[in-house]
Image (cartoon, rainbow, N blue to C red):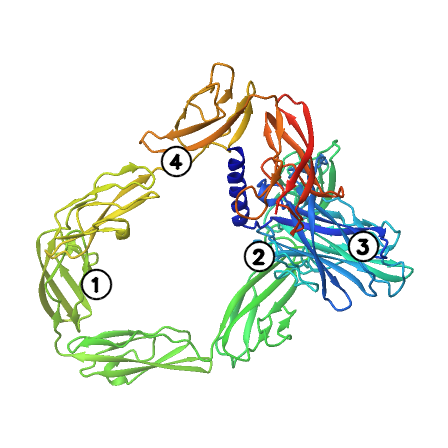
Amino acid sequence: MYLNRLKGILLLFVVLCVWAPAHALHIKGGWMHYEFLGKNSSGNYEYRVTLKLYRDCATPNPGQNDAQVNLTVYNKANNTKYGDFTANNIATYPLNKTSYSDCINPKPQVCYVILEYATTITLPASSQGYTISFQRCCRINGIVNVFQPSNTLGTSYSIEIPGNINSSTFPENSSPVFSQRDTLLVCYNSPIVLDYSAVDPDGDSLVYYFTDAWDGASQNNPNPNTSPPPPFASLPYTTGFNAINPFGNNTNVVINRQTGLITGVSPGTTGEYVVAVGVDEYRNGRKLASTRKELHVNVANCSITAAKLPVSISSCDGFTVTIQNLSPSPSILTYFWDFGTGGATSTSAVPTFTFPDTGVYRVKLVVNRESSCSDSTYTNISVFPGFFPGFVADGSCYLNPFQFRDTTKTRYGGVDKWRWDFGNTTVSNDTSLLRNPQYTYPAPGTYNVNFTVGSNKGCLDTIIVPVSVLDRPLVTLANDTLICSIDTLQLNAMGTGVFTWDPASTLINANGPNALVFPKDTTKYYVTLNDRGCIARDSITVNTLDFITANAGRDTTICLTDSVQLHATTQGLGFSWQPAAIFDNPRAKSPLARPTAATTNVMLVANLGKCTATDALVLRTVPYPTVDAGAGNTICYADIAQLRGSTNGSSFSWAPSNLLQQPNQLSTTTRSLTQTTQFTLTVRDTLGCPKPVSDVVDITVRPQIKVFAGNDTSIVVGQPLQFTATSNGLSHRWSPGTALSNTSIVNPVAIFRTGNYPADAEYITYTLTSTTPEGCSGSDNIVVRIFKTPPSIFVPNGFTPNSDGLNDRIRPILAGIQKLEFFRVYNRYGQLVFESNQENYGWDGRVKGVLQPANGYVYQCRVIDFEGNPIFKKGTFVLIR
């Protein structure tokens, strides 16, 4: 029985391994190095290769920690693959910043988790040497200096092993080891010092430089078995960033080629920036190899205590000035301002001070005065209020010069500085330093004139005013119009200059902007505008009618409470609709009507001057149909619900229809529902209100009751067993209650003692059932094997790894054990072929994917029992093919 249960567990484990998806790491950096171990008896070189990957501390999911990684070695001579190697995870540890300066606030977390992998690689002699490469996906999202989404981008790491073409001793080399000073805090808009230095075990010379951050594996294949050789594709840097300027073009961040220190001023945008540094290794003036380190640097939302003011401030509009420190640091606790007036001070963070007179004042700011985080600075404030810049531009056509006139006013001193930029972007000489210059524009258009003006008291200001330059004067007339033959009409022209109208035979005031006309037939009137020699001409046609007609439209039926737009067809220009109360604008040609009576008689009166016409229509209203989708309900996951609607309409339908048995019946049944759904009942009728009316009802679906009773386990009589079940139900019941401390909680404790369980029981199957107030339930089982022996280790004496799903792995069965420290397997030569500290993991009879021969093997196992005592056991078993 025990062997069959073991085979079932092993089969389930194998299936889970086969179908477990590859995880995409939240990578934030990494680097590689190797250590030369020596030559073997065949003359080959042995290296200990180590890869360090940095990932996000905020991702505790164990799936983010690969147990193994794949490394690929290439011959540098022709870039052919030498082989694939597997490196095991030898350490996983956090790298945290634990100490902060009191002058930094707030103190953000700086943290990485480092995954360290290592393997031993043996390589034959090579003239050009080798390249080791590794790829993985994916990076974190939201990296500032690369295109988004950055969590679709991978990463690549590579390191070079030198050949013997320059010296036979060059392959006997260990690569530089980067220092792990990676918890340095970087605040935005603040000085930075990042240490990317490395130590070379052989004492070789190192040269540092910025280099491209590399892309790598894809989301579809995040952990490839084989990595391609260099060169690798660069990450797609976003605009304003590149490998040489990882923090942006305006930050002046540089790297010291001799020390690897990165210095400068951090950017003003917070977030993570990818920074890659390469290092070349030289010996006796010859380059051996290159390696690189890549890291995501977090520019945090923090600041360093500082006093920072503009070099100078001018107050030209009053004696009162508000001053503010430009450093946003929240660690600034006190302020002290000296306004330079011989005694006036303030302790306000943002003081407002009224200076006693005009003049230039030397103002001092001290932050955190008499504190360990104190700083100070000065600025000059010039106080000369009453300065108001302005100008006017007089001109019209581009053929004539525009006259610009300064209208600036100042109360103190005099205006003595002018600079004009007339906004002609096609040339560079459209400027003047005169007070009132002239400028002739080369073409029509709108020009933004930039006028900077200053006074002898230090006031300086700039205004920008758009100036329109025309090809002719701007004259404006109304659209063509109508007139009744017995009326007189006023025509209105707008513009600057002298107006002349024609033909003069049927008009009055032919030489002004407004003319009266009285045509008996349709006539086109012209107006000419002369603005200092620039001429414009326009026309308007006046159509003459002896009478007009009016059509208010057809009788209409609408839904009650709706509105309808009416459209009059007429030559009239004036309108009056009755009854006026139902219209939004009874004087409009096409008003909105909202009748409330069943029948409303509407009258339209249209006029064109003294010519009038009338017409009528009838508006009828029909109420909307009623609809009620019924009351909502709460059901269990995957259950059905009954919908009951009501209406006085003539047709109806439910939506979404694909979730219903009969979507066109008022009372219908849903299909099996797995999520909360809102159903809509839509109703129509045929009584003259064709618009649909809807009502909704919510069917709430309780989440699926997910119960996990825990993995099957074993226990020794007298040992407490803590159940570790999980459930999202609200009430719980264990069955049977044998030896349980409480049958109504998720995680009871079981202690098997003589008399509280069947004496002949070897296995007990417990069932956990969880329910909700609605009656929804779920259950799961756990099998507990009871050992009457002391805490022990049981290892089968043989296994058959033939992939038939039965007894395919050899592993220890633990009774009364709280921790497996190791389970090791050795072949008959004493070589370690398998090692694990996972309780349910076992050896599948392979070493690096290669089937091992049928033979006898030795195992060693060390555990800690439930009382904390160590137990060690060793023995043999047989691998059967």
Q: Point out residue 494 in the picture as x, y percentages from the top left corner.
A: 36, 72
Q: Are marks 2 and 4 in contact (CB under 8 Å)?
A: no
Q: Which amino acid, mark 2?
A: Asn
Pointer 1 residue: 588
Mark 3 and mark 4: Cα distance apart in space: 60 Å
**Disc 4: which residue:** 705
Residue, disc 2: 221
Q: Give the mark nearest the N terminus, 2 or 4.
A: 2
In the image, 285: left or right of 432?
Answer: right
Residue type marked 1: Ala
Quick one: 760 or 650, which is closer to the camera?
760
Residue 490: x %, y % from top left: 26, 73
Chain-order first, disc 1 or disc 2:
2
Q: CA distance from mark 1 to mark 3?
A: 78 Å
Q: Secondary structure at mark 4?
A: loop
Kindly report the distance in space between the C-alpha atoms of the residues bearing marks 2 and 4.
34 Å
Mark 3 — residue?
Answer: 256
**Labels 1, 2: front one:** 2
Q: Residue 90's image quarter?
A: top right
Q: Could you say which is closer to the camera, residue 374 or residue 446?
A: 374
Of callouts 1 and 3, the N-terminal one: 3
Q: Which mark is residue 567?
A: none
Identify the secondary structure beneath mark 2.
Answer: loop
In the rendered image of this protein, does residue 841 appear above or below residue 261? above
Task: Tell me the kind of residue under disc 3.
Answer: Asn
Q: Nearer the viewer, mark 2 or mark 3?
A: 2
Q: CA distance from mark 1 to mark 2?
A: 68 Å
Real-space Cα distance between discs 1 and 4? 64 Å
Q: Secondary structure at mark 3?
A: loop
- Tell me which label, 2 or 3, sits earlier in the chain: 2
